[in-house]
Image (tube, rainbow, N blue to C red):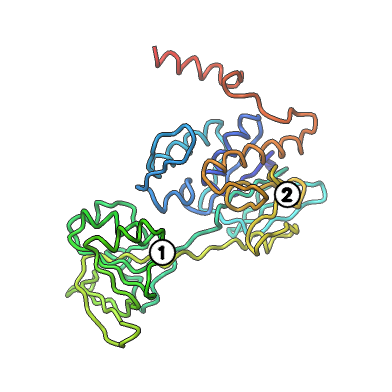
Amino acid sequence: MHNVFDVTIIGGGPAGLYSAFYSGLREMKTKIIEFQPQLGGKLHVYPEKMIWDVGGQTPISGERLIDQLVQQGLTFDPEVVVNEKVDSITRNEDGIFVLHAASGVKHYSKTIIIAVGSGILKPTKLEIEGAERFEVSNLNYTVKSIQRFKDKTVIISGGGNAAIDWANELEPIAKKVYVTYRKDTLNGHEAQVTQLLESSVTCFFNTKITKLIANANHDMIERVAILDNETGETTQVEIDEVIINHGYDREAELLKSSGVPIEIADDFYVKGTSSCESSIDGIYAAGDIIQYPGKVNLIAGTFQDAANAVNQAKQYIQPDANKYAMVSSHNEVFKERNKKLVKQLV
């Protein structure tokens, strides 16, 4: 006999975590399946960035917001499966969905909420032979801790918003910051670009890193070779740390390879409604992965998506259920929890 869940949420980022909280509020048996080894989604890419646009929340770092979202998402003890990639979805004759994982495991659910954000994100790697061996030392594809680069000479490859932001944040604390970019102008927000160009950061335009030169022990990068695409000249720069920001390869093959024909928008997103319904009854979506008129692509917007998706799922499996959950301030589910919280405040 299969263990069938009321709702299975694919994705453990902000949309998935709030979906888990809200489905617990609606007394649904819930499972979260996350590809990464931890919950939190894309917020892990910028843990030290300050987030200002979540309603009712003062400025908060990505890392702290992850902690709060995870704590909230686990309020009603959903089953959590990490390091699991869902490859496809099929449907049995009895209407139960089967989620087929790459591991060979099958998950069974009455409804599904797709909350995979921008898909499975993998940083675009530096295409230089042998570069991967430096990933354990001083070749970085993200900035998880700014303090790591304090008093160091850093070169950043890339000219988009993330690369520019990192350069601006590191400039006051690093010994020296270089930026190498393949084009002749930076491709970022105007104010951030101006800040960078007026700072002590040295920019190499129309250039790219062509070689990583190791130290005597061959365990760290000591210098990088930079090719000028216009003159053909190569310059070597001594560095302590290398940061690569060439964007992310994103994967959402689940939607295309699924055994149920989920309608897709722009060859990537779930084409949905403002109630977060997909083209398949019983399958819903929340967060960045869904497109519909009036969509708000903010973390704050994912919370409404999540609630809408859960409400639709609840009514799908229980048509006589209330359309919405009772507000938390008057919900009996929190009665005992509220007593404990009040005692702590007294």
Specify whether 50 is left or right of 98: left
Locate the N terminus by quadrant.
top right
Q: Tell me the amino acid under the disc marked 2.
A: Phe
Which residue bears the numbered disc 2?
97
Specify whether 310 is left or right of 147: right
* Image coords of residue 259 (percent x, y): 73, 60
Tell me the CA gap for discs 2 and 1: 40 Å
Q: Nearer the viewer, residue 304 or 72?
A: 304
Which residue bears the numbered disc 1?
160
User: Which image quadrant for residue 191?
Assistant: bottom left
Q: Tell me the amino acid under the disc marked 1.
A: Gly
Specify whether 286 is left or right of 282: left
User: Which image quadrant for residue 335?
Assistant: top right
Q: Earlier in the sequence, mark 2 or mark 1?
A: 2
Specify whether 257 is left or right of 199: right
Question: Circle 2: is it few (<14), some (14-19), or many (20+) Cα within 10 Å?
Answer: many
Residue appearing at x 40%, y 45% in the figure: 62
* Image coords of residue 189 (percent x, y): 41, 58
Q: Give above or below for 324 relative to 2.
A: above
Q: Nearer the viewer, residue 110 or 114?
A: 114
Contact, mark 2 vs mark 1 (Cβ under 8 Å): no
